[in-house]
Image: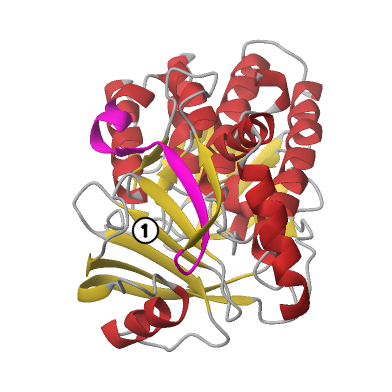
Amino acid sequence: MLPERTDVLVVGAGPTGLAVAATLAGHGVTATVVDRLATPPVTSRAAVVHAGTLEVLDRIGVAAPLAARGLPSRRFTVRERDRVLLSVPFDRLPSRYPYALLVSQAETEAVLADRLTALGGRVLRPYELTGLDLDGDGATATFAGGETVRARWVVGADGMRSPVRELAGIDFGGPADPGESFLLADVRVDSALPRDQVNLFLAPQGPLVWAPLPDGTVRLVASVPDAPREPQARHFQELLDERGPARRPDRVTDVLWSSRFRIHHRIAATYRSGPVLLAGDAAHVHSPAGGQGMNLGLRDAIALGDTLAAVLAGGPDALLDGYAAARRPLAEEVLGFAAGLTRLTAVPPAARPLRDLLLRGASGLPPVRQRLAVRLAGFEPAAR
């Protein structure tokens, strides 16, 4: 049952919303967390938690139990069919977690939810936000059943189609086109590729991400001109045939689940509008190349939770302007990095030999490899 009043209303119980609430709970602040879904999803888009994010999650007691559920990936490899163009090792990262942790987003959410429950919090379901009236002292949120909650602060952690962002009138920018189309699946596959690294295949048709998961399945993500409504095994086999290994081709034996989605490259005009604060996909969306999206959202969440706790403990509201001012440039940088990885695929045929030469040259320079590893791992400037 919804309370009549709360200090913090968190809308959205995905990784970002759960991390905000768990961070607040660690400071002794009980947030009201709502989600429109009756049950948590068991399938998910994100499949990697980077070292920089694990370091931040460690502060709220989540990194160790999450690491126990995942598969450590010690290397990120860029390939063109059978040729390795760039290999980025993670073993020299300045971290207690010198790897990229391959783990389903559903598992990440489960660990965060367990931590929130251990700290006395919970998620209220299903509650769909339909109205948001803002004033100088907070906001009144209205839900589909007619219930209302009065909140001092409202956190929009409700995804790229965020009702919180829209109801608060925050511009999301970006082009009017339908966005970049992607196919996504967890598959069982016969493959000679190593099961301890993520592979990004560059192909004229577009990029293909091949990432092993702890249960022996492989996460495939690929950009396509127009994704079919109901992706089948043959669609993913075709992707592997045209973009994956050639000498020893992969063979899809089963598709556990599949989906399609579109992504724009967008950032909210502001992360704060009065009592409304944005984090995660509600604030920024971009290409999945490099696995940066959920990671940036988790780091947003913990920064926001710490800042809200400081304000509720008597600090000035202006601290929240500092949150907004600090996080938005980081999203711009991540967006540019992810777009750059995607553009590696779109290089014209005449320029590909030079691209490949530059990538192989970078792979042979330890300082360059280390800078790329730190960048992929999500170590933000203040944390380095």
Secondary structure of residue under mark 1:
loop
Q: Is residue 198 above or below residue 367?
A: below
Quadrant holding the C terminus: top right
How is the rendered protein coloured? Answer: secondary structure
- Confirm whether the magenta stretch covers residue 182: no
Q: Nearer the viewer, residue 96 or 286?
A: 96
Image side of residue 4 versus residue 346, left or right: left
Q: Could you classify mark 1 by the number of other residues whose Cα lies within 10 Å: few (under 14), some (14-19), or many (20 or more)?
A: some
Q: Which residues are magenta?
A: 65-82
In the rendered image, which residue does mark 1 sit on?
44
Does residue 330 appear in the picture of this structure? yes
- Residue at point 68% right, 29% down? 367
Does residue 278 appear in the picture of this structure? no
**On the image, which quarter does residue 348 sit in?**
bottom right
Image side of residue 350 versus residue 366, left or right: right
Give the amino acid type for the residue marked by disc 1 in the picture: Ser
